[in-house]
Amino acid sequence: MPDALAQARDQMGPDALVLTARKVFDGPAWQVWRDPVFEVLVMPAAGAAAQPVEQPLAAKLAQDLAEVRAALGQVASQFEPAKAQWPDPLVALHKQLQAQEVDPDLALDICAAAKETLSPRALLDGAAVHAFAARHMLAQVRTAAVVERSRRPQVVVLVGLTGAGKTTAAAKLAAHAQLVLGRKAAMISLDTFGIGAIAQTRTLSELMGLPHALAYSADELAHAVRSQTSADLLVVDTPARNPHAAGQIAELAELLEPLPAERIVLLVASAATKTSDQLVAMQAFSALGLGGMVFTHLDETAAHGGIFSLACRTDSLLTYFSSGPNVPLQWEPASGTHLAKLILGDAPAGSGLGVG
């Protein structure tokens, strides 16, 4: 990433504005083994003279897009005849993945992997096909709880869209850290704009016996951080930001400047939000240096395939799952096994054939 940013600034000038910086995967979307690369979106500084810059990246992206379309067309043309010969358990798996709104090409990848890996006998066993799909999905996502029992000081910042549940998530994270992990947690709220946000933060923190502070500016945030000397974990709640308004993200970045550089920024996303909107949000908030995602409102949707699709497409770290408003309950470290069960449901009865 530093090399990509340096190259962008060399081409656009030292005063260029970095709009987004993210890790993407090179090669066609259907290749799960493709290598990660870094993409940087840069805008020239106001009043800067235009510099003639070669456009090899744009040409490469256009070529890659054409290759992806061609490859997907070939896959689609080969898939339909093959699907007609699938055994019933494989057809049922594909229908389940579609119903859960897993990306079509990812659903095909899971089914194709099962077809190529399992024996003809195992493909007739619903339990074996289910077990293979769960293991395959588990291998595709990264999960980790960023707050551990260690007493090393940590600052965790929650960002996201309106209605994502950041304030409740902040309270749940702080309460979980204090009650389960034995950490000394405190809350700092920068969300002084939303209606009722201040009252909600005060109520939740007082309910859990957590120290809390409000900050209206970067200076006040710096003071709030210095005042929480007894806490080894600071959970910072931020105001909602519109991912389509680059200025709002820039303002939030300036507001967070007093926090230590090793802070952990987590994007809070509702499981009920469309995957396409989640991708836009990730691209916008990536300028803040995202360290992972928290998914809330798991109980408000019956389709959880978008979580899996987003994690695969962006290689995002899944950190925590939340469902419901209960604090400190209904909060848990993200688990690939749990996600696979949400998408696949309970395993069907079968012979219990091993899948290797």
Image: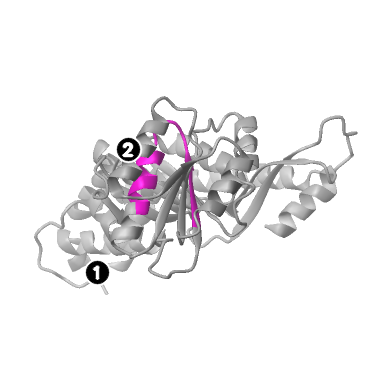
For mark 1, what is the residue? 119
Q: Position of residue 263 (x, y in %)?
A: 55, 56
On whether residue 161 falls in the magenta region, the answer is yes
Q: Quadrant of the C terminus?
A: bottom left
Farthest bottom residue in view: 356
Left or right placement of residue 125 versus residue 327 in this view: left
Residue 259 within the magenta-colored segment of the rendering: no
- Residue on which the image places disc 2: 203
- Image color mode: one colour
Quadrant where the image shows the N terminus = bottom right
Q: Residue at x 46, y 60 (%)?
A: 230
In which quadrant of the rendered view does residue 135 lie? bottom left
Say which of 200 and 17 sits in front. 200
The span shown in magenta is 155-174
**Residue type (three-letter) at the residue carrying disc 1:** Ser
Residue placed most toward the observer, 289 or 28: 289
**Rendered residue at 52%/33% (across/down):** 241
- For the residues labelled 1 and 2, the Cα–Cα distance comes to 57 Å
